[in-house]
Each structure stands twice: as structure tokens, then as C-alpha cells.
Amino acid sequence: MKLPSMRIDGKQALVTGASRGIGLACANALAQSGANVLLVARDAIALDEAAKDVRRHAPNVNITTHALDVTDTPAVNALFETHAPFDILVNNAGTNRPGHIRDTSNQDIDDLIRLNLASVLHICRAFARQARTDGQGASIINISSQMGLVGAINRVAYCATKHGVEGLTKALAWDLGAEKIRVNTICPTFVETDMTKRMFEDETFKASVLAKIALGELVSTEDLMGAVVFLASPAARMITGSAIVVDGGWTAA
């Protein structure tokens, strides 16, 4: 019996929100495992720097960039018309605006739903329309959150969007299963990134977060790389509609 491979040599991957943080880690992981990767984000200059980083670690694959606002649905559709077909999609672009529900503005709610949920649905649809139907299969990986599995104070709008991502992932697994397109999520706890750095300057807040993580540490972007490669690879060929929870034990309580 031979161990199934976690190599994805020659596969074509697209990663959104790829200019930094989790998205950049995902792009690096896929490239180092043999995939050609298209990095997508809004900032063209940051994308160029990200691409240099990925090429440095994976010099033998094709790394390209495309500056794009993922909430611009016509631009998303045009991207797939130009660059498709893809074998792997990582929906990572997203944001958070913490605050009590009474203080959450209409704009906050609309922006979070538009970026964290609606854009994911639109991109998944575009991917499904172009995905190969030769029986080789494909993989959609939606970066969700532990907050898609639980509730939390001052996170109502964010939790709503991430619960939505979990729901659409399960439904997509059924819509696309006959075509061997697998759809899964990765649900991290708080990850050390530029976006969360300011939060953790508050030592009281940081201590409250660490107290809920059984392993006693924040997640690093590197901690997510193995999960991304696994879900993208043949080793996960019978896994769909599922969530890999990378939360150090938060949701085990």
C-alpha cells in the first residue's frame, strides 16, 4: 500500500487576498508543493513583492499576479475568462470590524457581507463554471474561521459571514460533487498577521484569547500551510463539505 501523494505538481491554483498574511502563506504552500499560482489582491505593488517571496521559495513553478477587487463581480468573471482553467481555488480575501451589535453601522454590515460572503460565492461560481470536467477533480478551499463554528462577543457581523461561508461550503460540496470538485474550509483561530497586530497590543485582550486556546499560543500563518496543501492534494480526494479547524483547541471546550 502506497501513501497518497500530497504533491500537486503542474496544477493551476488561484489564491485571493494573496499579498500578505494567510493568503501569502497559502500561495507559498501551494507553490512549494508544485502548483503554478496566480496571486490576486487589490494592491499591485504589494502583489509584486509577494510574488517575489513565493518565487524565492519555489523557483521552478510559474507565479503570476492580478490586481483585483474581489467584490467587483464583473472583474472576477473577466479574470476567469482570461486565466482559466484552474484546479485549485483558495478564497482567502476577507476582513473584520469588531464591535458590539448596537455600534455596528449599516456600512460595516454591508461591507463584511460583500467581502467575506458574497464575493466568496461569486468566485466559487466562476470557478465552478470553468473547472475541468475530465474526471481529474478540483479543490475549492474557503478560508473561514473558528467564528464560523461558534459565537463571540463583539463579532456578530463577522460571525454571521463566516457561518455563511460554512453553509455555502456544505451546499457547494453537493452541487459540485458529481464533477469531483471538492469544497472545504479551514477554520483558524486568531492568527498573527499585520491585520491582527494592533489587537494584540492590548495585553488584556491577548491574555483573554490565549486563555481560550488549549495549546496556549496564537496560530501562525505557517500553521495553516499544511492544511491547505492537504486539501488541495490527492490525499484528500474523499474529503468534501468539511472543515479543518486550526484553533489550538478553542472549539473543543
Image (cartoon, rainbow, N blue to C red):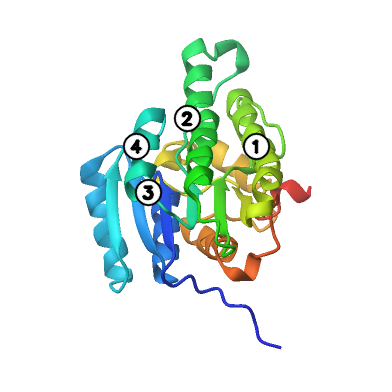
- The image quadrant that residue 13 belongs to is bottom left
Between discs 1 and 2, the one toward the N terminus: 2
Check disc 4 and report the residue beneath it.
78
Q: Secondary structure at mark 3?
A: loop
Residue positioned 41% across, 60% down in the render: 12
Between discs 2 and 3, the one toward the N terminus: 3
Residue 169 image position (x, y, % from top left): 65, 42
Q: Nearer the viewer, residue 5 or 50?
A: 5
Cα distance between the residues tagged 3 and 4: 19 Å
Residue at the far front: name it.
134
Task: Please name the amino acid that badge 4 sits on.
Answer: Ala
Residue 8 image position (x, y, % from top left): 48, 70
Residue positioned 42% across, 42% down in the render: 197
Check disc 1 and report the residue beneath it.
168
C-beta proximity under 8 Å, tags 4 and 1: no
Q: Secondary structure at mark 4?
A: helix
Check disc 2 and report the residue beneath it.
115
Q: Nearer the viewer, residue 217 or 223?
A: 223
Task: Please name the amino acid that badge 2 sits on.
Answer: Leu
Check disc 3 and report the residue beneath it.
18
Between discs 4 and 2, the one toward the N terminus: 4
C-beta proximity under 8 Å, tags 3 and 1: no
Q: Secondary structure at mark 1?
A: helix
Left or right for 23, reference 248:
left
User: Vertically, is 224 above or below 115?
Assistant: below
Residue at the far right: name it.
253
